[in-house]
Image: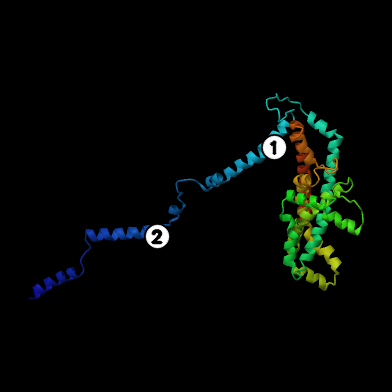
Amino acid sequence: MSGDGAGRAPARLATAHPEPGPAAMTETSATASLARRADLPLAGAIVRPVKGLSDRLIAWWFIAPTIVLLLAINIFPLLWTAYLSFTDYRANQPGREIKWIGLKNFDRLLHSEDVWGYLQVTAHFVCWSIFFQVLLGLGLALLINRQFKGHGFWTTLILLPMMLSPAVVGVFWRYLFQPQAGIFNYIVNFFVGAGDFTMIGDVDLAPWAIVLVDSWMWTPYVMLICLAGLRSIPDYIYEAAEVDRASPWRQFCSITLPMVLPFLMLAVLFRAIENFKMFDMVVELTSGGPGSVTELASINLKREAFEKWRTGYSSAFAIILFVTVFGAANIYVKAMNLVKQR
């Protein structure tokens, strides 16, 4: 009995703790392998590039149509104009042989008294219109910046001329300047008693008429830029100036004007470029008359190109105007950057 009991005890122990078989060992090794794989970093799977277009190539696909369009609209006409400026090409004679004449067109332009006269008229218009626009625009910006009652309504009313087309403005003011039915002439005759007063028909007053109309139209533009500069000045600077008992004029000269000056110079740059190529408003207002006292360089360029059909000559004129504006703008931008770095 005792021998049988002793013999059966190891059997029961073996049954309670069985040794792992081949299937159990396979399952355990698979679980351990999965655990090791789970602990591996996933960087390789994330960094692995996806087959297809790269971000750089996709960006170029989006930019390419715009670049092609800019080249077709801006660069090609400029290069074609530069080529025609060295020839005697006439657009109304397409079958005519184009002759290369070198710098003859530029020589004729630079030695022409009429061309220098047109440039003088353009300079008069650009300088005086910018002067009045800066003066009035800064004054209106200082007034609007005070946040008085109803300033929103007056701001909208002041901005209306800027929203009109230059051609429409020219036609509108031409009727105002009419000697017989013009309201402007009626007001002048009422207060001054000038008789048959005419603004656009007088040789001395016509250049000032285009300055007046352009200033009326674009002063709100300068006002907006100056107003943005005024709103960017922190209030604590004025508070510190008041603590130091600085007068309003001293605050304007030491705080307002220096901090608004970069914005003001930016407005001058934009308006100078636009006024230098002004065409539609002056054509509708005076057509360059009386005589040629209001004939800007752009108007004369149009007449040479599309009335006299001197395409090569007008192309040279266009290149001279482009180089003048481009060079002056670059010098001005460098000066403006120096002002900003003060």
**Which circle marks residue 39 in the picture?**
2
Quarter of the view holding residue 23:
bottom left
Q: Is residue 21 above or below residue 13?
A: above
Task: Tell me the amino acid under the disc marked 1.
Answer: Leu
Disc 1 to disc 2, C-alpha distance: 64 Å
Within 10 angstroms of label 2, few (less than 14), some, or many (20 or more) residues?
few
Q: Which residue is mark 1?
A: 78
Horizontal arrangement in the rendering, residue 118 relative to residue 61 (left or right):
right
Residue 260 seen from this side: yes
Q: Residue at x 73, y 25 (%)?
A: 100
Looking at this view, is 325 or 214 the one in front?
A: 214
Residue 341 seen from this side: no
Looking at this view, is 301 or 335 the one in front?
A: 301
Label count reads 2
Horizontal arrangement in the rendering, residue 74 relative to residue 206 (left or right):
left
Q: How is the image coloured?
A: rainbow
Horizontal arrangement in the rendering, residue 99 relative to residue 27 (left or right):
right
Looking at this view, is 121 or 263 the one in front?
A: 121
Q: Is label 1 in a helix, a strand or a loop?
A: helix
Give the quadrant of the C terminus: bottom right
Task: Tell me the amino acid under the disc marked 2.
Answer: Asp
Q: Nearer the viewer, mark 1 or mark 2?
A: 1
Looking at this view, is 190 or 41 the one in front?
A: 190
Q: Residue at x 79, y 55 (%)?
A: 216
Q: Is residue 284 above or below residue 8?
A: above
Measured as percent of width and height from the top left, residue 91 is found at 71, 31
Q: Is label 2 in a helix, a strand or a loop?
A: helix
Measured as percent of width and height from the top left, residue 68 is found at 60, 40
**Which circle marks residue 164 in the picture?**
none
Residue that lies at the very extreme toward the front in this rendered image? 180
Measured as percent of width and height from the top left, residue 108 is found at 82, 31
